[in-house]
Image (tube, rainbow, N blue to C red):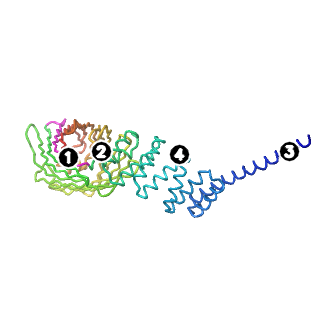
Amino acid sequence: MKQTKFFRILFITVFIFTAGKTMAQKIDTDSLLVRTAKEINPNKNYTEAIRKAQLGIKLAPDYLDFHLLLGRAYQLTQAVDSARFYYQHVLAKNEKYEEAFGYLTQLEIDARNYTAAEKVADRAIELYPENKNYYLKKLAIYQLQKEDDKVHDYLKVLEKKFPADAGIRQQLFLMDTKNNTDRIGVNYSLTVFDRAGVGPWHLGSLQYIRERKWGSLIGRVNYANRLSEGASIANGVQYEGETYFFTGKNAYSYAGVAYSDDIVFPKWRLGYSFYYNFKKGWEADLGIRYTQTIDENLKAAVIGVGKYLGSYWLNLRTYIQNQDSKVYPAFTLTSRYYFNTRFDYATVLLGYGTSPDERSIQGQLEQRIALNSYRIGAGYYRVFGEHYLTGILVNYNNQEYAPGRKQNETEINFSLQYRF
């Protein structure tokens, strides 16, 4: 009986000692893991992190967190082969270590092993289909290889997968503008007034648009005819050229020039704007406009900001104009909802003041700058088949034509283009 009691006490003593030792080791390794992680971030002491991670693996060889941290420390010290070994070891043991997929994919991207990087990204997407980061890494792989067709097709896939992502919509819009296409088209606008003896005004345009990967060129011939009491009081032709050209991965510029020798148009019209696309769907632009009429040289600064919100695009543009040493602002708020392509959308516009970018009133810009104007408009644009682009836009403008006197103007604009 005494012998049995002795062995029982001995067993309990050994058990308590062994369990305590195991628990102490667990506590020590967990503490070591925390210290190792701190050496990587925020301390950025990668040499010490490697030492601690190796010690952790020696103490607990099956503790995969140490392998992951060791791979991360090696990656940050450019020891690519060692980092790859430990990431692959972690994933071979347990694919639930989601961070290892991200680190390994980026490691292969940085090493320009794009085939291996895509393979890792595909496996991560298969296991974690709702994690957007892996899709974006796969997109980056295509972009770094300059595979524009793959980039465009994959952006279309991502647009459907993540319809609320403004950055994806923004990138797709920019990619679409780099397609090699040619278009010819006509525009026609009719402006009617509620004031007796004024109007209607007619403005027609014939244009050619050439889009290439570097940007686009637009040539346009405009014809305007203004009537009063059924008779033409001013008409003429304007010649216009515009271009949009890319000046970086996220930047592009606009430049335009127009000339006319007829009073219904300004003699010269010049413009330039620089656009920059920020992350998360933001875009900003800064530009200048110059309009030379018979009597005046008008200058304006342009400041704009835009934002993609899923399928929506919002843009606010401000024109700071100078006339007779006074400053007159004009504002235009544009909203669009895109359906399938950049040519399929509905739009609503709100505005105050008269800007040099309004085509239908170019010849009256100097008379209108200092007068109040309140505008609202709505339009719809759509692609039919493979070739035809159509659109209609209706604008209503409550315009002050003389101090304290107002008229209502309604402009209807039609457009038709053929793409080939």
Give the mark nearer the N terminus: 4 vs 3. Answer: 3
Q: Is residue 410 above or below residue 329?
A: above
Task: Looking at this view, name the residue that lies furthest to the right.
Answer: 2
- The amino acid marked with disc number 2 is Tyr
Label 3 element class: helix
Q: Compare residues 312 and 117 and report the one nearer the observer.
A: 117
Point out the frontmost of discs 2 and 3.
3
Disc 1 marks a residue whose amino acid type is Arg
Callouts 1 and 4 close, C-beta under 8 Å? no
Q: Amino acid at mark 3?
A: Phe
Q: Label 2: few (<14), some or many (≥20) within 10 Å? A: some
User: How many C-alpha atoms fall within 10 Å of the one at disc 4: few (<14), some, or many (≥20)?
Assistant: some
Q: Nearer the viewer, mark 4 or mark 3?
A: 3
**Which residue is label 3 attached to?**
7
Q: Nearer the viewer, mark 1 or mark 3?
A: 3
Query: Which stretch appears magenta?
Result: 179-196
- Left or right: 341 in relation to 75: left
